[in-house]
């Protein structure tokens, strides 16, 4: 570990699911002198040692190099999941905005860049064993989220070649949940009118078991701890997989919810999602559903060995906490995370 006492860290996307956990952990870290949180709208939440700045990364007018001046590390988390019906808009925000962040890191001579990649950057892979960080990152081309994450992997390849003086870390987490993120994620993936109280086991007569639907999850605070460790660990470079056990499939989830899995063909599940998405009833696209069915399981040994990272919550504990947040309208005092109950 480095002696990084007095480090100044800038966090983009600081008011979202991951950003709030990262900012909180950094603000509690005695080795961090100050945190600057960047977001489109400044929150009412005021953790110690933290200052806020309203910045829209999609705007070409944003002077990011000035915001990064004097920073010892930039943690880039900002990401727009919607509108899924307008991929040009998310491309401008996610890809072009990220490129502006990378260029500003170089211009401000920030020595450390920690970038939020994703399991979604990976090419289709196995569901019966885990892959390490050498697995190809070409994404699933039909899904905007995966396409954007994979493109930024290639962008960072070039950035690292041109700026070897910057220590670049790429975090590739599984699906991230916490109690406070429940309302935000309900709106992003299920729609703002989906009643959170419906997330009750007694209302589920069965759970659809779709072939290939086997994924990994992680508590957002556990992911945030990996980001914090990456700032402090001088030798940490490259990609790190982040996930908790066990992998989640219909059998595990049905046992957790006290219901039974019922086999549902891929085509039937996709048709239902595509119909709801086409009618603008469901924000999550069928293209993302296709990608999820093809995501590989990740081996997280490198993060545990090189960062000393270990998840504190199991994947099933994460889902239990998230479902409780859905039922109770879990949230925080930031615009993206505002807690709301529907129904």
Image: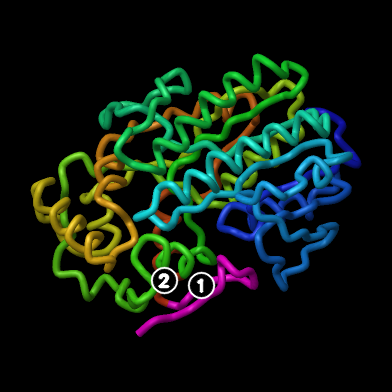
Neighbourhood count class around disc 2 (C-alpha, 10 Å): few under 14, some 14–19, many 20 upward = many
Answer whether residue 310 is magenta in the image. no
**View extreme (bottom): residue:** 343
Q: CA distance from mark 1 to mark 2?
A: 6 Å
Side (left or right) of 104 relative to 342: right
Which label is found at residue 16?
none
Side (left or right) of 315 relative to 237: left
Regarding mark 2 in the picture, which secondary structure is present there?
A: helix
Percent x, y of residue 144: 38, 43
Which residue is painted at 63% across and 24% down in the image? Answer: 306
Side (left or right) of 241 relative to 261: right
Chain part drawn in magenta: 328-343
- Quadrant for residue 160, please give it: top right
Regarding mark 1 in the picture, which secondary structure is present there?
A: loop
Which residue is painted at 74% across and 23% down in the image? Answer: 166
Percent x, y of residue 97: 60, 43
Asked if disc 1 and disc 2 are in contact, CB closer than 8 Å, the reply is yes
Rendered image coloring scheme: rainbow
Percent x, y of residue 308: 64, 31
């Amino acid at each position: 570990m480095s002696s990084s006492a007095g480090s100044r860290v800038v966090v983009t996307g600081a008011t979202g699911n991951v950003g709030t956990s990262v900012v909180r952990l950094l603000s509690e870290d005695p080795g961090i002198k100050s945190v600057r949180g960047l977001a489109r709208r400044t929150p009412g939440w005021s953790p110690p040692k933290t200052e806020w700045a309203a910045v829209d990364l999609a705007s070409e007018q944003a002077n990011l190099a000035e915001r990064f001046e004097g920073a010892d590390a930039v943690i880039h988390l900002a990401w727009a999941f919607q509108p899924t019906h307008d991929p040009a808009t998310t491309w401008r925000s996610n890809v072009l905005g990220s490129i502006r962040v990378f260029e500003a890191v170089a211009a401000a001579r920030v020595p450390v860049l920690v970038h939020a990649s994703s399991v979604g950057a990976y090419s289709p892979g196995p569901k019966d064993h885990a892959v390490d960080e050498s697995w190809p990152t070409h994404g699933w081309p039909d899904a905007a989220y995966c396409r954007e994450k994979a493109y930024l992997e290639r962008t960072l390849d070039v950035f690292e070649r041109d700026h070897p003086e910057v220590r670049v870390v790429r975090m590739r987490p599984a699906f991230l949940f916490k109690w406070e993120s429940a309302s935000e994620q309900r709106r992003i993936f299920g729609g703002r009118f989906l009643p959170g109280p419906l997330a009750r086991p007694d209302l589920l007569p069965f759970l659809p078991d779709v072939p290939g639907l086997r994924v990994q999850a992680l508590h957002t605070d556990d992911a945030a701890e990996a980001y914090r460790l990456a700032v402090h660990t001088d030798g940490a470079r490259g990609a790190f997989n982040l996930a908790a056990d066990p992998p989640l499939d219909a059998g595990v989830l049905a046992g957790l919810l006290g219901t039974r899995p019922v086999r549902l063909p891929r085509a039937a599940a996709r048709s239902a999602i595509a119909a709801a998405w086409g009618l603008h009833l469901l924000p999550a696209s069928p293209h993302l559903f296709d990608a999820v069915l093809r995501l590989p399981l990740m081996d997280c040994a490198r993060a545990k060995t090189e960062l000393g990272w270990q998840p504190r919550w199991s994947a099933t504990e994460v889902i239990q906490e998230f479902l409780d947040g859905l039922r109770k309208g879990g949230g925080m005092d930031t615009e993206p995370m505002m807690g709301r109950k529907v129904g």
